[in-house]
Amino acid sequence: MVPMFAMTKTPAAPLPLDLDRASSEPLARQLYDQLRELILSGRLAGGTRLPSTRALAAELGISRNTSVAAFDQLFAEGYVEGTVGAGTFVSTELPDQLPASGRPPQPLVEAGALSGPSRRGRMLAGLAPPRARRHRAFAVGVPELGEFPFELWSRLLGQSWRRPDMTAQVPGDAAGLPGLRAAIARYLATARAVVCDPEQVIVTSGVQQGIGLACQVLLDPGDKVWVEDPGYPGVHGALAGAGMKLAPVPVDAEGLDVAAGEAGAPDARLACVTPSHHYPLGTVMSLPRRLALIEWAARRDGWILEDDYDSEFRYRGRPLASLQGLDRCGRVIYAGSFSKVMFPSLRLGYLVVPPHLVDVFRAVRSAIDDHASLIAQPALARFIDDGHFAAHIRRMRRLYAGRQEALLEAGRRHLGGLLDLAPDDAGLHLVGRLTPAMGARMDDREAAWRGGDAGVATVALSTYRIRAPQPPALVLGYAAVAEAEIDAAAAALARALAP
């Protein structure tokens, strides 16, 4: 429903857009820039209905993929919004403006009378990761949803709520439903060598909330946190939102460089790491580095946040033991999520905290957020305990392994001389490094925009870095792309990147 836009109309005149086909700047970027300027200048007012991507492409004489790429970026940054079947509208609350009052603008009594967001607010807004509307090749971080057993899931939900237990109706424990915490503990002990009992499990609304909770319990505002460089912006946002100061630490073939961290930020109190499968590089932290990190935490009275975001999807070799399982000092907080394994809107994750911190984690959780939604927790406990969760992981592991191989084969066929794609033993994406010849013509951000012009979504590796220089590369997600579509998408990307 979009009631506030129900009476809006498209602009009375054609949009004043002028795309320069002779420019080296991709057409999608030009279209995005010009539409954004029209919105911010007020020439396209909040609530204005924009032409469809198909109509705009026809009007400008460009491919629809180009207009879709521009609209996707505007949508991701909050300049437009819409509902399927209702169209796309200019947002009434823009990321670069104060919320609209709904009244005609009045002249200010004096310049600067209205304040904008704080420095902290602007900084956090800049950390927001891109969010695409459409699941298309090669969108990153999107799992395959068509293979999830939703009929089974709906039955479990129905059974849970036909005669719900009182513990699922009235919040009792800020740590989450006891049955779910027990199911998570059993699963982690078997699959990830995590050493814990159910009392140590804290159910959260996702990994990012769990990171924020850990910071609230263990750190004070302004404390330094080691973060992987490059690394996931969502983790950076969770830490910065909790008032932490980010201390970027480079990642090499063995994972987080502990020695570099000690040299650059010796007074850090927390290290936030993805040791089982670094995002986005895919490296695995070596055993010497793991032991060195645990030794650093014990020696410095520090903490380690182990973000185990996709360890279920390992295609070759034995599953890796968790960092938490190596810890004998009570210094590791283990974080996991069901979003990538099941479906993102579930919004359930968990922390495993050392025994001596259980009571304070529960108390702080109760003070700032009370508890995660209980609606899905009984069904999720059954889904795990009845073996459906493990069976789903096995099915998806086979599916994703096949899709990775299809992408590698398509890369060999179409992207030679442009991108060097290497196989990865785990995960849902591959990193394609720009070849020297390709890198001499453009950087990875330009390459990502050109792919967007062709209807192929990728992410520039440089968008994940803070300080550490990285070779130009594109991150390509394959999980949500059917094998039959991968070859055509790789061919379209090759055409977009060709000289």
Image (spheres, rainbow, N blue to C red):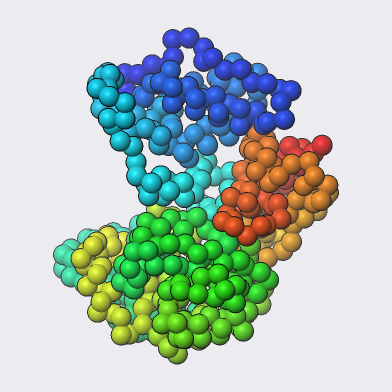
- The quadrant in which residue 106 appears is top left
Q: Quadrant of the C terminus?
A: top right
Camera-side residue of 433 and 174: 433
Residue 449, image x and y in percent? 64, 38
Q: Residue at x 38, y 46 (%)?
A: 119
- Which residue lies most toward the front here? 110
Q: Does 121 sit above or below residue 284?
A: above
Residue 463, how many percent across, how many down?
58, 50
Query: Up-down: is 320 above or below 94?
Result: below
Pick the front one: 475 or 259: 259
Q: Residue at x 50, y 75 (%)?
A: 266
| Residue 96 picture location, percent across and down | 41, 34
Q: Residue at x 43, y 31 (%)?
A: 80
Q: Give residue 281's quadrant in the image.
A: bottom right
Let me know if residue 152 appears in the view: no
Judged left or right of residue 191, residue 101 is left
Q: Is residue 5 above or below residue 419?
A: above
Q: On screen, 416 above or below 186?
A: above
